[in-house]
């Protein structure tokens, strides 16, 4: 293993260079104003070809952009045909407010042991680590125990319709006895293995009043004010109504966060007749998304009867709870051993509020371990990846491949 780990260390510069190339190819979903993952996926296909690895690509056509959303599988045969999957995603979220960035979010900058740029941690760190783990194994002619299959999927950030759900619904890639790692969540110590996720509910609220001149508010009904009041009502009532706790998760309760807000009127002196905002709900398995929506419907009817106006809401995305992975599953045991040997920490299992593609596997009855050594900078301004995390995580994947 020392020889293998030393080989990984020699690949450090190449790993950083690949991070730079990936960051320069923004893979943003159409929902967020982007063109998807095509450029990034085709570039990675070329990289894999030049490395000499066997690969398969599964392109899902997206009518909204009249183009493909690629999903790329990289294959390194092992002693046994059974697959060990390491799954990461190609897409990234938008940069957000550029004034909060100290560097260009899509031009990776290396400072000391950090690579700054959108997507460097989420999810390029583990994508690059898994690919160079394969390279290190092959460079030293190390044959993995199982066939090592890397999978780089599309559309993880916006629902996975064109990514893992497309693959699960249209191809027979995954078998019951496969070992699956989704390399997309973790803690700073590298000790946390995620085995459960809260269900996800994204809600869009449309508040309708009556537009008027701001100097004559009595002639209108301010939708912005109505929306603000209703938002505050949701913010107060939802946590109180759905207050159960589950210590498997961190935080151990359901969360209800107001997030996106659409523009209403372009000028200051007009009272808006319509206001639109969104909620991101992360729900414990003890509740269903339908229960949340039913309660909101009750609040809405009571609110409009008392205050006036019209309120409609709809689910932009909703996922049913997925059963947790058994902490005694084979992949969890092997992952714990690999992590402990490389990082010298005692791994533990936990549930999280963040959503990953692991939920789709768990709904199919396939056990999954979610892991990575993360600083927790995903989706933030000045997102960065620690180079040491990327390199050492590659060692974990090397060790895992030989167990």
Image (cartoon, grey):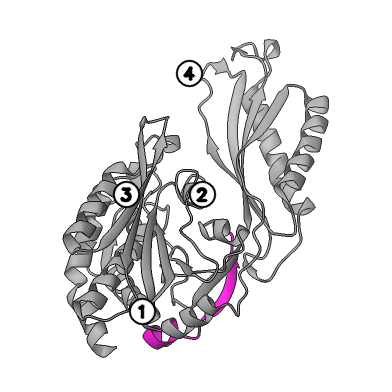
Which circle's residue, 1 or 3, is located before the other in the chain? Answer: 1
Q: Are marks 3 and 2 in contact (CB under 8 Å)?
A: no
Which circle's residue, 4 or 3, is located before the other in the chain? Answer: 3
The quarter in which the C terminus is drawn is bottom left
Identity of the residue drawn at 29% across and 54% down: 117
For the residue pair 268 and 221, the one nearer the viewer reads as 221
Q: Quadrant of residue 80?
A: bottom left
Identity of the residue drawn at 21% across and 72% down: 12
Which circle's residue, 3 or 2, is located before the other in the chain? Answer: 3
- Viewer-nearest of discs 1 and 4: 1
Compared with 383, 348 (above or below) is below
Q: Residues within 10 Å of mark 4 (few under 14, many from 20)?
A: few
Q: Position of residue 336 (x, y in %)?
A: 49, 82
Query: Alpha-carbon distance for marks 1 and 2?
Result: 29 Å
Q: Position of residue 83 (x, y in %)?
A: 43, 70
Residue 235 lies in the magenta stretch: no
Q: Which residues are magenta?
A: 339-354
The answer to whether 13 appears left or right of 274 in the picture is left
Compared with 326, 320 (above or below) is above
Q: Which mark is residue 101?
A: 3
Q: Quadrant of residue 162?
A: top left
Determine the secondary structure under disc 1.
loop
Residue occupied by mark 4 = 267
Determine the secondary structure under disc 4.
loop
Q: Residues within 10 Å of mark 2 (few under 14, many from 20)?
A: some
Residue occupied by mark 1 = 79
Q: Is residue 116 visible?
A: yes
- Viewer-nearest of discs 1 and 2: 1
Query: Alpha-carbon distance for marks 4 and 3?
Result: 28 Å
Q: Which mark is residue 165?
A: 2
Which circle's residue, 1 or 2, is located before the other in the chain? Answer: 1
Q: Position of residue 135 (x, y in %)?
A: 23, 71
């Amino acid at each position: 293993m020392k020889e293998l780990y030393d080989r990984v260390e020699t690949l450090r510069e190449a790993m950083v260079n690949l991070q730079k190339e990936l960051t320069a190819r923004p893979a943003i979903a159409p929902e967020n104003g982007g063109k998807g993952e095509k450029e990034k996926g085709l570039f990675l296909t070329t990289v894999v070809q030049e490395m000499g690895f066997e690969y398969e690509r599964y392109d899902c056509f997206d009518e909204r952009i009249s183009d493909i959303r690629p999903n790329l599988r990289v294959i390194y045969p092992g002693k046994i045909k059974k697959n060990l999957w390491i799954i990461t995603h190609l897409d990234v979220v938008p940069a957000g407010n550029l004034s909060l960035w100290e560097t260009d979010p899509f031009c990776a900058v290396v400072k000391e042991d950090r690579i700054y740029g959108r997507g460097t941690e989420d999810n390029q760190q583990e994508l690059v680590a898994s690919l160079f783990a394969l390279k290190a194994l092959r460079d030293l002619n190390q044959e993995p125990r199982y066939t090592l299959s890397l999978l780089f999927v599309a559309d993880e950030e916006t629902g996975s319709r064109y990514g893992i759900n497309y693959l699960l619904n249209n191809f027979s890639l995954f078998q019951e006895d496969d070992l699956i790692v989704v390399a997309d969540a973790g803690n700073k110590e590298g000790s946390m293995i995620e085995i459960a996720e809260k269900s996800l509910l994204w809600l869009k609220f449309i508040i309708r009043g009556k537009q008027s001149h701001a100097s004559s508010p009595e002639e209108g009904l301010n939708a912005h004010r109505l929306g603000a009041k209703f938002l505050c009502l949701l913010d107060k009532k939802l946590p109180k109504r759905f207050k159960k706790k589950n210590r498997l998760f961190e935080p151990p309760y359901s969360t209800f966060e107001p997030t996106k807000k659409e523009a209403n009127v372009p000028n200051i002196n007009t009272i808006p007749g319509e206001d639109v905002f969104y909620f991101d709900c992360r729900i414990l398995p003890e509740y269903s998304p339908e229960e949340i929506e039913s309660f909101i419907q009750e609040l809405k009817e009571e609110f409009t009867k008392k205050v006036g106006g019209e309120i409609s809401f709809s689910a932009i995305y909703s996922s049913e709870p997925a059963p947790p992975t058994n902490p005694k599953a084979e992949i969890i045991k092997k992952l714990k051993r690999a992590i402990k040997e490389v990082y010298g920490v005692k791994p533990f299992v936990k549930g999280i509020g963040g959503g990953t593609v692991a939920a789709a596997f768990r709904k199919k009855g396939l056990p999954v371990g979610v892991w990575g050594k993360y600083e927790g900078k995903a989706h933030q301004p000045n997102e960065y990846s620690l180079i040491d995390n990327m390199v050492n995580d590659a060692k974990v994947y090397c060790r895992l491949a030989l167990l």
